[in-house]
Image (tube, helix red, strand yellow):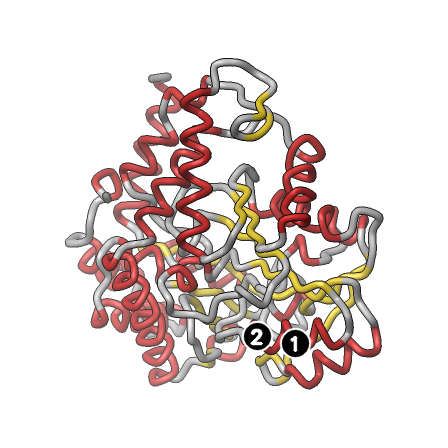
Amino acid sequence: MDREISRLIKKETKRQNEGIELIASENYASKDVRDACASILTNKYAEGYPGKRYYGGCEYIDKIETLAQERCKKLFGCKYANVQPHSGSQANAAAYKALLPDGGKILSLVLNDGGHLTHGSPVSFSSHLYNFVFYPLTNGYLNYTDILEVAQKEKPDVILAGYSAYPYEIDFELLGKIAKKVKARFMVDMAHIAGLIAAGCHMSPFPYADIVTSTTHKTLRGPRGGIILTNDEELYKKINSAVFPYYQGGPLEHIIAAKAICFKEANTKEFKLYIKHVIRNTRACQEELVKLGAKTTGTDTHLFLLNTLDSFGLTGLDAQKKLEEIGITANKNMIPGDTLKPNKTSGLRIGLAAVTTRGCTLEEAKSIAQIIYGYLSGNMTTVAAKNGVKSITKFWKKIEKIS
């Protein structure tokens, strides 16, 4: 391998193995998934869909993509699945195009309250191509009565649910009913909670949603990529056209093979147990921080928000940088009602999915909270904090060997 790249990969491998990864949107894919990502399938052009390609030599590629589709449909209990999107953002772009080919109005969560860039941010394509209006959280929670009132006032074409920093369970059935009341289509972006839904630990968006998008690399623990799901045959045809040829060219068949593997892995008893441990560990970490005196949200999922400004007098950015000094990686994040800008923020988003993959226990989740609190409050030295991180990670599974 290229010496410079090889050296940097080794450094990154060391960082991942020796650190504590708390970014809620990250996880560790299995060796089987990574092997598929690095396979010879990357050599093949396969524009189009199984049985309808624009290139020859796709006999085995068709079987791989069909297998990925079938496994995805089985995992999430839906009739149709497009497994070609290169990312969650492209999945959302194609979903919007399928639902609103001529533009329209989309009702989504206020971005600072936990929405996503592609859910109407002014720096995203989404706000330039569609008219976004928003509903807020109430005391940190979705208020379905308020959402209905906003929907009745705004009369959106689409109601969008699914968030990047919302720590509580979402009532998809009730949101689906709201959409029907105002004659809107209902779309769910389940990127963050796809693994929880697959494991039966969170309400499924089916049969309530018209269209569902997701990434495959967060709690689902697969390769980086996206998927689009539906039960509507006519909508599925529009989705396929929106993905290819409208937004994408040749699909990444090596990644689609890796997606197929991750769908199979997620449909096991072991994965269901893993997700239960993720939820348990996340709650233990959050509750320990509160016990120590920090201000946090609650949690029903794989993540929670830590208010670093009120807890430690630190912006989210400063807290993120301080934790990196001792080998803990988290990301700055807006909190509901945040008065600081997105490049600073008043908090951190903390998730336990990645560390649970490596073998984090309930007691270790509490120990992580103690290190975070001790170091950010100034009551723990850098040396003591680093030693605490090392004592936790030294017995965890190594990244190269996770399967």
Q: Quadrant of the C terminus?
A: top left
- Image-based side of 303 in relation to 386, left or right: right
Q: Is residue 396 visible from the viewing direction of this image?
A: yes
Q: Residue at x 37, y 47 (%)?
A: 263
Q: Position of residue 370 (x, y in %)?
A: 30, 73
Q: Quadrant of the N terminus?
A: top left
Q: Residue at x 64, y 78 (%)?
A: 137
- At numbered mark 1, what does the secondary structure look like: helix, strand or loop? helix
Q: Quadrant of residue 23?
A: bottom left
Q: Is residue 124 visible from the viewing direction of this image?
A: no
Q: Give neighbour class at mark 2: few <14, some 14-19, many 20+ (Cα, 10 Å).
A: some
Residue type at numbered disc 2: Glu
- Image-based side of 270 in relation to 105, left or right: left
- Image-based side of 11 in relation to 395, left or right: right
Q: Position of residue 123 (x, y in %)?
A: 73, 50
- Image-based side of 396 in relation to 69, left or right: left
Q: Is residue 219 above or below residue 49?
A: below
Q: Residue at x 37, y 27 (%)?
A: 38
Q: Position of residue 317 (x, y in %)?
A: 54, 60
Q: Position of residue 95 (x, y in %)?
A: 66, 49
Q: Are marks 1 and 2 in contact (CB under 8 Å)?
A: yes
Q: Give neighbour class at mark 1: few <14, some 14-19, many 20+ (Cα, 10 Å).
A: some
Q: Which residue is mark 1?
A: 177
Q: CA distance from mark 1 to mark 2?
A: 6 Å
Q: Which residue is mark 2?
A: 173
Q: Residue at x 32, y 54 (%)?
A: 267
Most distant residue in the top direction: 56
Q: Quadrant of residue 176?
A: bottom right
Residue type at numbered disc 1: Lys
